[in-house]
Image (spheres, rainbow, N blue to C red):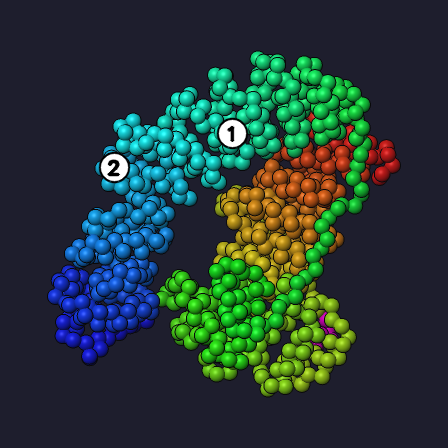
């Protein structure tokens, strides 16, 4: 799009010359002309420069050469207020258009009042993203102004990034840096620092050696570095950052006195820090113990924390430390042996076994009261180990032998769907709700409430609505650009339309995204854009809707048929023609259960839309399309095939406009994959598009989730799984496969979402445990899932009361997992299966388990197979099968 940069006729001669140079992109000339202008003349240029700045967005790739640099320079110098100048320099589009060099800006501002420059520095540094990306500009202004460097998070991150490892010795650069003594203490306080600490090169030993060297030279305080390093390790940092600060700690090499003085901090690192940090703390505490400088209280505190961590190495280390201490000093047995018995409650069977062996080895030196305490704690052992403990502590331990949970799981109740709230009676309340959604408090229900509220209030009192929304708009960040147009969500575009600031280019871009180049993967996310484009177009031509038809009745996205009939009757009474996209979305959200009263009421509607609704309600819900499991073929680009789902086209889809046609079209990710690459946003929002047909959307989500699983990525979209479980319709192959991938996701948070979905489906009677178990086994055999991960998720389900459900899953997964070579992680599956079998009334032989249990030796695989064999045999003999 070609943009004309016009200079108003009323502009004075000097200002005209400056603006003409800006327009031509003559940055050197702009700098010289700025020196000749008075402050008043500079201020006169600002309105024109602001208009041109807005035009940058529309220029796209047609931006004149040099205009961005000259415009950035002129605006920064013509804004006489520090706040305005900082705002100008922080503008994202201007910074992008001007390129990376900022030296010309610094030179032009060099003669300004240092106090004024200091204010500009503080305002720029207060904006994290700007301070980080514009560090060089801010640092140069600090040097010119002679002010103290800012210590905001963004500026610290920018400073750290400016000192890269490689090319020049990091220590030399830090010694020459004027900010080093101010910035280094902040490195231990700002989240995200230390990303380069783990790196070194042959010609550059990197940050740890450099900082340790500066401490030796007295430039930096050694105690501050040690304390800061430990505080960083206490936080929730990524592995790379933890490794970097551990390297720094090693480079500092604290003395025994320095380590002993920080004993409480080392103990505090054991419970819930990163495993690498906890292991370093254990080693340090063990060294202090050997030196006789670790008190029993600190040892007990660290041991209790370590023995409940999931990492086997940490637990084994702590048990070994307790063993050494009690051997060296038997008088401490009464204090330490009950602590070692805390290992009886660990979820890992082999660690329970190790803790039991330690307790048995030392129990004879314990007092009678302590032995009674140990017997009581032994009740927490798994049944097979309880039998072994009974040989040492007597019948008191065996008292819980054979206790089983009831056959039915104690699952949480299926939550009832929440109804959406009515449109607020106050425009100010609605504006607050819209602002909350735009800031990230975004659920399908809240977004639909906001959309319907905007439409309703625009129809009722647009002036009051715009006034209430002004503060919301002012707080919004500028949306990203694509081809010169703003990339906005459906709610953002409706907001722009309400405020009258949606350009034709914005509207065309939204329509293009909603209607063009659709495929089964992009269509779910495009339905909302199609509705937004429709809403905005009607607002622009003065034909605004009184309210939306497709606003859900319940938070799941479903609409009560009776309610939709009432809405359409109100449209007919007011002579309003429904929006096609809004009406189609409403039809797709209809509840499967339709009362006879709703059918009769719909038959009385007279408009074309009313007759369509009446026909739909009379004929019943949209039939569920057929779905089929498909295994990807082994190819060069698919070295680890996955399992996907093919979905046939829904009835009548070819008669619908886009994106609804693609939404309901056939989906064959194996035989006829989409050119888009198969990705789709997995979110509760797209599930609210088809809340009664979860298999259709689960099949589309599955492709992207499978790709993420192949590359072991984070963010596989499992946050949508609880919404998938809350949806209606059959829970078939796609739903169970998505759940299987989710249970094996990389992070704990992602797996928690999958567990929530599993529990909801189980409570609703929609979970096929056998199908899920077979899916987990097949994906493991295809190397798409790591058993340790889905076992961790299933443990969470067991802790929530789903013992029988998890046993059903694992008993179905074990036969294919035990067939052929054992996959990595099989031990974790067998261990959890044994625990569930010992607590479940289900019995009967599991194919493959007897063969493994009959092998000679005492490996953990064989031990766990024998536990399963014994447990299922006991259940069968008890007549529970």
The range drawn in magenta is: 615-620
| 632 or 589: nearer the viewer | 589
Whichever of labels 1 and 2 marks the residue nearer the N terminus, that label is 2
Element class at badge 2: helix
Element class at badge 1: helix
The numbered mark at residue 267 is 1
Residue 191 among those drawn in magenta: no
Q: Residues within 10 Å of mark 1 (few under 14, many from 20)?
A: many
The quadrant in which the C terminus is found is top right
The numbered mark at residue 173 is 2
> Residue 486: which quarter of the image?
bottom left
Residue 10 percent coordinates (x, y):
19, 79
| 95 or 515: nearer the viewer | 95
> Residue 384: which quarter of the image?
top right
| 209 or 220: nearer the viewer | 220
- Seen at 27% across and 29% down, the residue is 218
Relative to 857, 671 lies left or right: left
- Seen at 73% across and 53% down, the residue is 413
């Amino acid at each position: 799009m070609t943009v004309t940069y016009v200079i108003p006729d009323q502009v004075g001669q000097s200002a005209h010359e400056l603006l003409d140079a800006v327009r031509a992109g003559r940055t050197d000339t702009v700098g010289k002309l700025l020196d000749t202008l008075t402050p008043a003349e500079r201020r006169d240029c600002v309105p024109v420069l602001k208009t041109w700045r807005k035009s940058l967005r529309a220029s796209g790739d047609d931006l004149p050469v040099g205009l961005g640099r000259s415009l950035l320079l002129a605006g920064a110098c013509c804004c006489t207020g520090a706040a305005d100048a900082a705002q100008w320099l922080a503008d994202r589009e201007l910074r992008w258009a001007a390129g990376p060099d900022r030296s010309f800006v610094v030179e032009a501002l060099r003669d300004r009042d240092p106090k004024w420059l200091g204010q500009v520095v503080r305002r720029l540094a207060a904006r994290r993203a700007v301070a980080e990306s514009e560090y060089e500009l801010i640092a140069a202004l600090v040097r010119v102004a002679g002010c103290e460097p800012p210590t905001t998070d963004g500026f610290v991150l920018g400073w750290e990034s400016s000192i890269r490892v490689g090319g020049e010795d990091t220590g030399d650069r830090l010694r020459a840096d004027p900010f080093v003594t101010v910035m280094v203490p902040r490195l231990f306080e700002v989240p995200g620092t230390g990303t380069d600490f783990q790196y070194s090169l042959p010609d550059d030993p990197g940050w740890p050696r450099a900082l340790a060297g500066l401490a030796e030279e007295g430039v930096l305080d050694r105690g501050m570095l040690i304390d800061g390093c430990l505080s960083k390790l206490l936080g929730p940092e990524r592995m790379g950052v933890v490794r970097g600060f551990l390297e720094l700690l090693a480079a500092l090499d604290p003395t025994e006195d320095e380590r002993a003085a920080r004993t409480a901090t080392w103990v505090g690192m054991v419970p819930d820090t990163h495993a690498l940090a906890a292991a370093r703390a254990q080693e340090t505490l063990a060294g202090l113990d050997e030196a006789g400088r670790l008190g029993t209280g600190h040892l007990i505190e660290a041991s209790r924390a370590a023995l409940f961590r999931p990492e086997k190495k940490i637990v084994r280390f702590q048990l070994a430390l307790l063993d050494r201490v009690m051997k060296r000093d038997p008088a401490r047995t009464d204090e330490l042996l009950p602590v070692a018995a805390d290992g009886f409650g660990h979820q890992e069977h082999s660690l329970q076994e190790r803790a039991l062996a330690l307790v048995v080895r030392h129990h004879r030196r314990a007092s009678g009261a302590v032995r009674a305490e140990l017997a009581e704690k032994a009740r927490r052992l798994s049944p097979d180990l309880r039998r072994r403990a009974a040989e040492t502590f007597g019948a008191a331990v065996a008292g819980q032998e054979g206790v089983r949970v009831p056959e039915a799981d104690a699952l949480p109740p299926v939550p009832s769907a929440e109804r959406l709230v009515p449109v607020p009676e106050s425009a100010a309340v609605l504006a607050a709700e819209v602002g909350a959604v735009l800031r990230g408090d975004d659920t399908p229900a809240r977004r639909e409430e906001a959309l319907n509220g905007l439409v309703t209030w625009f129809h009722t009192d647009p002036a009051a609505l715009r006034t209430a929304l002004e503060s919301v708009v002012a707080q919004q960040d500028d949306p990203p650009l694509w081809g010169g147009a703003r990339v906005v969500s459906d709610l953002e575009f409706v907001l722009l339309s309400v405020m009258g600031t949606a350009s034709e280019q914005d509207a065309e871009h939204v329509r293009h995204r909603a209607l063009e180049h659709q495929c089964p993967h992009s269509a779910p996310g495009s339905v909302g854009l199609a509705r937004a484009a429709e809403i905005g177009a009607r607002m622009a031509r003065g034909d605004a809707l009184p309210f939306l038809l497709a606003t859900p009745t319940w938070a799941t996205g479903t609409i009560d048929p009776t309610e939709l009939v009432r809405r359409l009757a109100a449209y007919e009474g007011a002579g309003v023609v429904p929006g096609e996209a809004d009406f189609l979305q409403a039809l797709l959200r209809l509840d499967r259960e339709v009362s006879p009263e709703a059918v009769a009421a719909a038959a009385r509607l007279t408009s074309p839309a009313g007759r369509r609704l009446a026909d739909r309600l009379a004929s019943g819900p949209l039939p569920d399309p057929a779905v089929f499991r498909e295994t990807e073929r082994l190819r060069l680009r698919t070295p680890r095939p996955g399992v996907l789902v093919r979905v046939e086209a829904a009835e009548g889809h070819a008669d619908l406009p886009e994106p609804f046609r693609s939404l309901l079209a056939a989906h064959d990710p194996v035989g006829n994959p989409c050119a888009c690459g198969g990705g789709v946003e997995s979110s509760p929002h797209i599930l609210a598009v088809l809340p009664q047909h979860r298999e259709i959307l689960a099949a589309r989500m599955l492709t992207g989730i499978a790709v993420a699983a192949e590359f072991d990525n984070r963010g596989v979209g499992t946050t949508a799984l609880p919404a998938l479980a809350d949806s209606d319709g059959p829970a078939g192959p796609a739903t169970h496969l998505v759940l299987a991938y989710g249970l094996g996701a990389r992070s704990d948070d992602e797996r928690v979402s999958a567990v929530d979905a599993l529990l909801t489906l189980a409570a609703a009677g929609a979970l096929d445990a056998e199908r899920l178990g077979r899916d987990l086994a097949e994906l493991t055999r295809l190397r798409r899932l790591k058993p340790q991960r889905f076992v961790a998720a299933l443990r969470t389900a067991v802790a929530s009361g789903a013992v029988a459900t998890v046993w059903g899953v694992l008993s179905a997964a074990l036969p294919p997992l035990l067939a052929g070579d054992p996959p990595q992680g099989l031990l974790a599956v067998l261990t959890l299966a044994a625990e569930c079998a010992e607590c479940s009334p289900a019995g009967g032989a599991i194919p493959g388990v007897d063969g493994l249990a009959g092998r000679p030796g005492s490996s953990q695989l064989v031990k766990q197979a024998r536990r399963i064999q014994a447990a299922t045999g006991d259940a069968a003999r008890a007549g529970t099968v």
